[in-house]
Amino acid sequence: MHMLDDAGVGGVEKLKLVRELGVIRKKLPEVAGVNKLTLVKRVREIRQLLSVSGGAPAVSLSIDPSNPIESLKSLTDYVKNGLSAVPEVLRGVEADIVANIGRSLQVERNDEHEAVRRDFWDALSDAARGNGDKTQDEWMIASFDHFKSLGNVFDIDMDVINATEESIKELTAKPLEEISPEIAAQMKVAQEEYEKLRLSLTSLISVNEANGFSLDEINKATEDYTEISMKKQSVWHKLLELDKQSSDEKKMRVKELKDSIAPIGQKIIDTLLNSSKVTQEQADSWANSQIIEKSAIVKLKKMGYPEADIRRDMSEFYRITGGKLRLVRIETNGSRRANAGGIGHFEDSVIRPGSAFGKTVLWHEMAHHLEADPVAVSASNGYLLRRRKNEKVHSLRSLTQNPGYRSNEGAYDDNFIDPYIGKVYQNRITEVWSMGVQYLATPQDAAMMAAKDPEMAALMAGYLQADLTPAMKTLQAIQDSAKDKAQEKREQVKSEYEQALDKLAAGVEIIDDGWFGALDPVDQENLLSRWGGLGDPEAKFIGSWGGYRVFTGKFRDKLSKRTKKGNSVAYTTMTGSFVNPDDNKSRFMPNSAPVHGDERFLKAFMRMASMHNDSVYAVLYNIIGRESKIVEEANKLSGEQS
């Protein structure tokens, strides 16, 4: 590979590159797969080398946020001397990224710095004037076309894939009689027997004294009713089993059809992996360094998706996307629908699993973060603009006939593989990358995408194997640095929080003093009741700390809004009965609050309540869920308390 040095390219070297470019252009139509990707990459490198005039210095882009004025000068130099090396269709977006970086620099305002700032914005203004007269939509479409041309490398038998898809549709629509005549025949016999038994039971109901039957006849009918009911239940279970067999048979045949095209899809995936600029070792290192919160690990393990598999799938994602995404955190927030947050955020790029989560969903949510790159946003919107039937936005409910979508979820209409690809967001974020990369997660889906939407497959391949622009690399480095600092801060806060819990819990001892057993039975029932009490009639008393009464059971968690195993703490100094001593009639319930956490957290909760006039509500609603507040509470403890 030729490298561009400070002297640039000129003379004999330039002629060699021109000849090499001509040879590659002749070969390009005859090759496919990874070889074609390699040649396309080399064409891009040669064009970049030839775009630099002989003798001109190579322009690098590297900034130091701690030295903002020199960084701004570096950005200005890049705009003036390096922006032209970026493909024309991407220069506008590249200039926007440079502008965003410039805005993020904390440049002090004074006369000397003002001149540097003015030079920077003047350079950007000149670059904008030289970027043609296309509209924003036209530039986005051109961006899509650019990456599509780079990724149009797959040589596959689309007819085989499309024929397989048609076979899957036909099989799915076939009645049971055609899929499995044997099972259908058995179900028919069982259904007829079930109907006879149902009619027999109906006739036996009329055997009663009111209809003139004798006691012996009624007793005999009762015995027959019991016997027939058992037979009817047995036939019903047989019907359920036969139905499951027929469903399993259909699923197995569909799987066989999908497996038949898996080698085609695997070839596509292997092509992208083999052309990746990221080594397996690099990808493994990045995957193993990502933060997966303990709560997420526990939740996903219960779903059958252990941590080792998550990191393996993350590693493959980093390779297939060419390292365009590195830092991301997986956390839980109780959501039933998986989602990505903080796209492009300097500190907080996260993925939150929903009630179902596996490799395809992981890749879908990780791919959302690719749109931290404005170039990716431009290309994905260009794809939608190129492909949509018209400007009208339809509800996803109407496009999919799926009532599960919210009424305000809309999308462009076209022959997308999935209508969800056309979803429209106000901030121009799309579902194009998330869905496209998701299709690359399995060989069968990769084959289907290449056959049903070759334009989308080409867009994925073209962008994923392309280099990030210099400005995007710089922005990514800034983000990585900011995230590292943010993580250091989070770890410090976490350490302070753990120490605070230790301090608050120290000295709190829960003793089984028999308090609950000594209560009036009416008060016991009221205290545990769902209405006005702790909320779990099956809760068990475990002990007291002063006037704090601790129970274990299932209670509603304030943070997740779900009922789950945990503790509840009630506060009262009364024993025996909760009858109001003033009128000796009315009863009252002590204040109580659910507490979800380990024993140390439970003890810390009671300690904090004792610091707030014994109000469990004050702690529940003003402190729980806010780690910094808990640290503040621990710092308030006097020497005697701690």
Image (cartoon, rainbow, N blue to C red):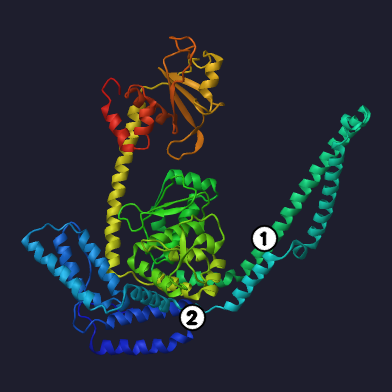
Q: Residue at x 19, y 75 (%)?
A: 126
What amino acid is labelled 2 in the image? Ala
Q: In the image, is residue 597 above or below residue 488?
A: above
Q: Earlier in the sequence, mark 2 or mark 1?
A: 2
Q: Which residue is mark 2?
A: 32
The residue lying furthest to the left in this view is 111
Are discs 2 and 1 less than 8 Å apart at CB?
no
Q: Which image quadrant for residue 203? A: top right
| Rendered image quadrant of residue 89 | bottom left
Query: Considering depth in this image, is 632 or 188 the residue closer to the camera?
Result: 188
Residue 393 x, y percent position in the rendering? 45, 65
Q: Quick one: SS at disc 1? A: helix
Q: How many residues crowd mark 1 within 10 Å: few (<14), some (14–19), many (20+)?
A: some
- Residue 159, quarter of picture: bottom right
Is residue 25 in view?
A: yes
Residue 4 seen in render: no
Q: CA distance from mark 2 to mark 1?
A: 34 Å
In this picture, is 456 found above or below 285? below
Q: Position of residue 598 (x, y in %)?
A: 44, 32
The spot of residue 576 in percent (x, y) is 49, 11
Question: Where residue 567 appears, x then y in whole percent?
Answer: 47, 29
Question: The disc labelled 1 sits on which kind of residue?
Answer: Lys
Q: Which image quarter holds the C terminus?
A: top left
Q: Quadrant of the N terminus?
A: bottom left
**Which residue carries the number 1 mark?**
251
Q: Nearer the viewer, residue 270 or 564?
A: 564
- Above or below for 186 versus 198: below
